[in-house]
Amino acid sequence: MLQQIVIESDSKLEIKSLLESAIHSELRSVQRGIDLTRSRLEAFEKKYGMTTAEFLRQFNPDDLKETLDFIDWQGETKMLALLEEKRKALEVGLLTK
């Protein structure tokens, strides 16, 4: 789905460069979140001796005992997916200028 935003301004300020700067700033923030989330996932992988992909294949009430760590681990995987989706959307916004 193509989304388009049109901004008009009577201001003498260069709106385009301000928006690009804001997008770059948000991209840096999102990337920090991705890096932090990945490090949390790595900590779980080391602690439990399995990759996140293996964990996700096994994570259901029948195969693994539900613990707070496992719930957090699953939550971190969802957070990573959301952050990566946001990064992708921001990058597309920069590419279509």
Image (spheres, grey):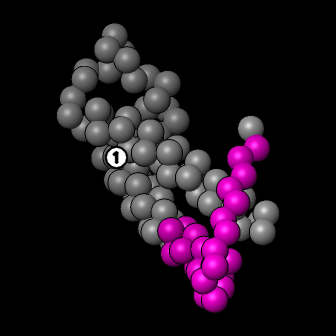
Q: Nearer the viewer, residue 63 or 88?
A: 88
Q: Residue furthest right?
A: 96
Q: Examine the structure image and report whether residue 3 is included in the region drawn in magenta.
A: yes
Across and down, in percent, residue 45 comes to 39, 46
State which quarter of the image contains the N terminus: top right
Q: Which residues are magenta?
A: 2-27
* 72 versus 34 height, above or below: above
Residue in the image at 36% along x and 54% along y: 40
- The residue carrying mark 1 is 44
Q: Examine the structure image and report whether residue 34 is included in the region drawn in magenta.
A: no
State which quarter of the image contains the C terminus: bottom right
* 97 versus 1 height, above or below: below
* 79 versus 71 height, above or below: below
**Is residue 49 found left or right of 66 in the rendered image?**
right
The three-letter code of the residue at mark 1 reads Phe
**Is residue 25 found left or right of 88 in the rendered image?**
left
* 90 versus 65 height, above or below: below
Residue in the image at 20% along x and 34% along y: 68
Please, what secondary structure does the residue beneath circle 1 have? helix
Q: Residue furthest bottom?
A: 12
Residue in the image at 50% along x and 68% along y: 26
- Whether residue 66 can be seen here: yes
Q: Nearer the viewer, residue 7 or 68?
A: 7
Across and down, in percent, residue 52 comes to 47, 40
